[in-house]
Amino acid sequence: MPGYDGRVDASPGARLLQTALPRDPEGVVLVLHGGGSRRDRMRVSPAQLSVLRMVPVADRVARAGRRRLAVFRLLNSVRGWDTRHTPVDDVAWALERVRDRLGPLPTSLVGHSLGGRAALLGGHLPDVRSVVALAPWVQPSDVRDLGGRDVLVVHGTEDRVASPARALAVAEALRSSARHAGFVSVTGGRHAMLRHHRLFDGLAADFVTATLLGERPRGVVAQVLDGRFLVEI
């Protein structure tokens, strides 16, 4: 069934959902949702908007991978950013589960909002080769050594939830360690990515296939991987 996500594995908190699992995948993509907390340690619902928002992203990446990429969505242990057990801990758990099942494969983290923050902060984990942060909600201190990784940050100019300026500063700081780091500014783009969803989804898919599969990059992604940092579209 197109778009069906079957549950693969679960911990006491986080859950891993399958979007695509070819017989012999050449790479892995882990898609991370955002969403703020509403009460202390509130459980993530598969039906919440921040989770559903990532379904078309995962589907777009899977289609672009043409049965060469295993694509999973991660449901975090709790909503928001619980400092006792952060979404980065859930990312580490998910990567271990996928590695146990498929073996070591080049991996990309694709996240939106707080999921984008988790992707950037988890980019140093084993097997991660590239990171895509869509409208990431970040703090200025969210800079890790991402030596050898490729990083793409995509942010709308009209985002009133996550600061484009903070995201730009973090992306700029990552240039000192990442193999490639680029920031794409989407004119008129807002936090939910609804009006420009094809653009956000497409950039994520193009970046993942270029960095994991060696697909020839095009357009904006080609510019970033050629060394251009700031691209305005």
Image (tube, helix red, strand yellow):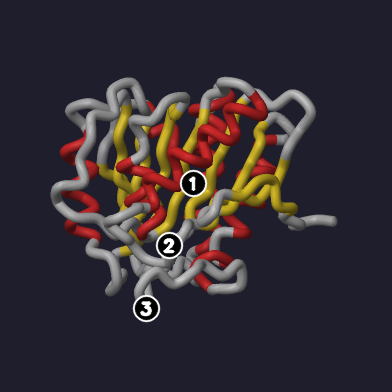
Q: Kindly identify which residue carries mark 2.
A: 34
Mark positioned earlier in the residue sequence (1 or 2): 2
Q: Residue at x 14, y 51 (%)?
A: 140
What kind of residue is marked 2?
Gly
The label number, if any, that marks residue 48 in the structure image: none
Q: Going 32% across and 51% down the picture, which residue do you hit?
A: 117
Looking at numbered disc 3 in the image, what kind of residue is underneath it?
Arg
Q: How packed is label 2: few (under 14 Cα within 10 Å), some, or many (20 or more)?
A: many
Q: On the picture, is 78 further left or further right than 85?
A: right
Locate residue 33 relative to residue 67 in the image: left or right. left
Q: Name the residue under label 3.
A: 39
Residue at left offset 49%, top offset 35%: 108
Measured as percent of width and height from the top left, residue 222 is found at: 43, 32
**Pointer 1 with pointer 2, Cβ within 8 A:** no
Going from N to C along the chain, the mark reached first, 1 or 3, is 3
Name the image quarter holding residue 100. top right
User: Which residue type does callout 1 highlight?
Assistant: Leu
- Relative height, residue 192 to residue 90 (above, below): below
Label 1 sits on residue: 203
Query: Could you tell me how far apart the alpha carbons at marks 1 and 2 are, in whole angstroms?
Result: 18 Å
* Element on which disc 2 rests: loop
Q: Which of marks 1 and 3 is in front?
A: 3
Between 58 and 60, the one lying in front of the other is: 58
Does residue 190 show up? no
Name the residue rendered at 38%, 34% in the picture.
Answer: 223
